Image: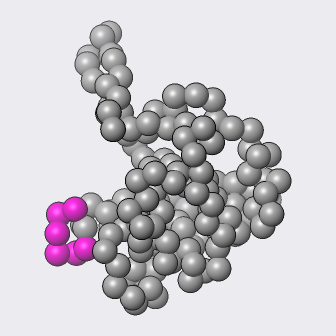
Amino acid sequence: PQSTKTGRRLLRLWKARERLWNATQSHEAKMLRKYDLLLWLRDDSVWVARFPDPTTFLKAPLASSSVWARSCGSWGGVNDKVVVMGRSAAAPMLTLYSTFLAGDVAEPTKNSEEYMKRAARRAGLVLNYTSFDVLPEASAMIIGEPRNISVCALRL
């Protein structure tokens, strides 16, 4: 990834997620509590329906070590548009930058989605592929000026 513009963007994204993960752990230490679920979504995500009740995820077998991602657009791996993860799954999924730099997932992969899947499997995580009904998110962008804003959803 270091040799292409897209790859460098991906590494910056993973690095930003890792920084947020580190900040989350610091916040947890101050609160003396840990989150049960964590969520990442891309900056072009728009919820088109209510987010599901978190107990839907928490009641699943092995919830702490589970990852939920949409089944579409997975390109042989994990669709990174929106991902819900249990507490134990958060560290491996949110430290992909360090994992990549350390060479911990040495097998070649075709894309970032496949890399995430291999990293998750290597960490012993449970991958759950869900439908749009479970994670109702769509890619979109906000366009316009402050008094005239609209959302432009991307068609698939």
Is residue 15 visible in the rendered image? The answer is no
The colour style of the image is one colour
Is residue 58 shown left or right of residue 74? right
Nearer to the camera, 148 or 49: 49
Magenta-drawn segment: 1-6
Q: Quadrant of residue 62?
A: bottom right
Q: Quick check: 58 above or below 141?
A: below
SS assignment for the magenta stretch, majority: loop
Q: Quick check: 41 above or below 16?
A: above
Is-magenta flag for residue 22? Answer: no
Q: Quick check: 57 above or below 15?
A: above
Is residue 61 shown left or right of residue 150? right
Question: From this viewpoint, which residue is outermost toward the left?
Answer: 4
Is residue 116 visible in the rendered image? The answer is yes
Residue at the (30%, 11%) spot, across then down? 148
The x, y position of residue 99, in whole percent, is: 46, 80
Q: Quadrant of residue 33?
A: bottom right
> Which quadrant, please, contains the C terminus?
top left
Nearer to the camera, 151 or 70: 70
Q: Quick check: 59 above or below 110?
A: above
The x, y position of residue 90, in whole percent, is: 62, 65
The x, y position of residue 60, in whole percent, is: 79, 57
